Image: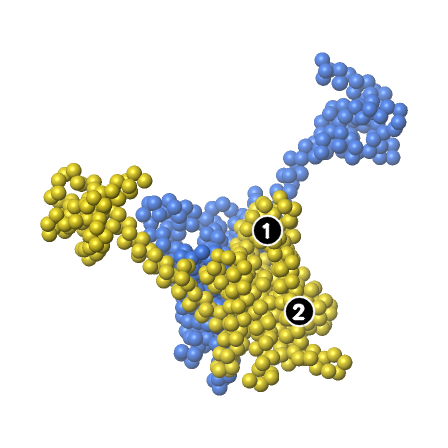
Amino acid sequence: MSSLEFEILATAMTVSAACAVPGAYLVLRQMSMVADAISHTVLLGIVLAFLVVPLYGHPLMVFGASMMGVVTVLGIDLLKRTGLVREDAAIGITFPALFSLGVLLISLLTRDAHLDEHMVFQGDLVYSVFQRLELAGRGYGPMTLWKMAGIFLLNGALALRFHRELKIATFDPVLAATLGISPSLVHFGLVLMTSVTAVGAFDSVGSILVIGFMVVPPVTARLLTDSLARYLGLSLLLGCASALGGFWIARTVNGSVGGSISLVMGAMFVVVLLASPRRGLVADWHRRRRQRVEFAVRMLVIHLFQHRALGQRTEENHAGHLEAHLGWSAEFSRRITELAEARGLIRRVDTHWLGLTSVGERQAEQALAG
Amino acid sequence: METFLQFLNDYTLRNVLLGTAWIGVVGGSLGTFAFLRRQSLLGDVISHATLPGVVLAFLAWQRRDIGVLMVGAAGTGLLATALIQVVDTRTNIKRDGAMGVALAVFFGVGVLLLSMIQNLPTASQAGLDKFIFGQAAALVQSDVTVLLVVGGVVLVVLLLLWRELKIITFDPDFARATGFRVTILEGGIVTLIVGTTVMGLQTVGVILMSAMLIAPAAAARQWTDRLSIMVLIAAVVGGASGAAGAAVSAFGPQIPTGPVVVLVLTALVLVSLFLGRKRGLVWHWRRQRRSRKLADPNTVLGALGALESAHAGTVRGHPKAVVRMAVGQSAQVGQALAALRKAGLADEHDGDWSLTERGRSEAVRLARDQRG
């Protein structure tokens, strides 16, 4: 790996880590689509800030551009509060408008290579690395790497310092208000953090892919754990792992690094979605099947219990008639009967008639009583 | 003027205007349902998710006819909605998270594929990234025909299923209870939304097409409570904005169509929010102002009397704000004070109000009457 490639990889991982911090809280607070709105509208912020401070990546410019995220969320809240449109429509009206203004300004005003349409939607990790940080004539590596490392440290420090506030305001806003933590301050703090990160990541992954960097690793982590600490750690880890895998794919197929990382994030999500031990679709499918079988065994026991007074040889107790009486298929009836028999709940009076054992009777009584 | 007429006669422009306006009409009609069903952001996810489909279709058929690309776009768009549905119903992930993941991952894969074909020697792939923001000027006669057919199919299905769609939009539980196949119908609506979204790829672009679904409906909602009229208004708003956007962007090759259409739409939404019949903010504010209590002159007289007896000999009068406080927070005392002055009961000096002799005895009489 050349040193340039190493720098690209390091930048990719730093961007992922920086995005995962606000992303984890956005997902918990059900603000994924608000993040989507912010990531679109910071474009307008960047264009406007660029017109005032034409130094891309300057901290002042980053902060100025980030204010557009706050403006977006205020706009959404304002629309919502009129009571004339619901939240989803408020988001869907606000951000396309601000985004359009940004795109239009770019196409009309600037001819600058740093801000073309191409950058807007995909950014370019490889290109962004070519901008070097130079101090007193000495080079200190790519500017983006330093910028994103700074944003990551800032996000991480803020998240650690305000961990308690974030946690309480997220899970119990009423308690937060009682304890003197302002939920709206936490809300807008997170919005600002999201905006700063989106602006910072703009030249490396663009204004739209950044939403994936923020949302996909935490959502994946959420499928794996219920502990907040582990969730936060996993979000960071999955983000960085995706950057590593994505970088390798991009190098192999000679394609966009940001796009490749999104692909890996998506693949990880799908794998976890299918195979997560407790939340995964496969586990879910097994659970549902097991529940269906357990429920059927219990139903069979109760069915036989209800009809015991009629004597042992009524139609209802005939093994072949379960299909008609319980609506089961022949195959399913056979399986359930065998299972119940193996568990010692029922016995065969002779080949075709079924009866309860004493264990089965007790279970039926319990089930009916409870 | 003459150049403008020439401009209208222009063959390309006619195509572009017709195509974009038609997308607005179909988007507005379908969007009404998405808006009412609180699925406004679904269009946003679908439109982002069409990108990989567009590129894959191009790779598979090596052509960039709008019909071919729409097939690919619809494919990945539907896949994304299916993913959202599964994640939403089968896991602990909330719907917004599922939507964020679907949007970002599909778009990201699209970006990757796009970057890969840009390295291919095929020359005709140039312009595929125009799908991001749309360039209506690229619309030709055959494209418009495809758009007319697809949009026509969407609208016909909409009309055929009108009653069913209405019921599952306003009362899904009732629909389920009365035996409608709600799941299938919901899938049908989503499919129609996908169909509408892919129509806008070439002219409005994948990022902004969602606004074509939401904004006309949001504007129309402010003018009526009837579904049929709302759909009609949304269709007109969408069509007009589409045409306006296409016309403006035709003036310069560097003006992308999508953003212009969206800005026109946003302006119409804002106007509707402020002026909309009954619900409009302007009427709301006006009602609020009217309903604010106009203080009764007698009450103000009594309040002034009470103030003066409390501060007897120390001050000559009281400013309006003090009188208002004495009467009650939200009361408007200006008119009452003016009436009292006209009747010769109160007077004002340098912004301070005080009672005249006659006013003072009147206040005393009032206080006595109230006590008795």
x and y percent of residue A89 in the render?
53, 54
Please state which amino acid type lies under the numbered disc 1.
Answer: Ala
Q: Who's blue, chain-wise?
A: B
x%, y% of residue B99?
Answer: 48, 61
Q: Looking at the picture, how far across and down is residue A331, in whole percent?
A: 19, 57
Q: Is residue A58 above or below residue B210?
A: below
- For image coordinates 54% across by 59% down, the residue present is A229
Q: Which residue is mark 2?
A: A150
Q: Is residue B219 among what the camera can see?
A: no
Q: Residue at x 12, y 48 (%)?
A: A349
Q: Position of residue A100 (x, y in %)?
A: 60, 65
- Give the number of the disc on residue A169: 1
| Placement of the N terminus of chain B among the 4 image quadrants | bottom right
Residue A258 visible from this viewpoint:
yes
Outermost residue toward the top in this view: B372
Taking A14 as reference, is B73 left or right?
left
- Under tag 2, what secondary structure? helix
At horizontal 52% and vertical 75% (from top left) the residue drawn is A244
Q: Colour of chain A?
A: yellow
Label ID, residue A329: none
* Disc 1 chain ID: A
Q: In this orientation, which residue lies closer to the viewer: A279 or B223?
A: A279
Residue type, numbered disc 2: Gly
Tell me which label, 1 or 2, sits earlier in the chain.
Answer: 2
Identify the image quadrant of the C terminus of chain B. Answer: top right
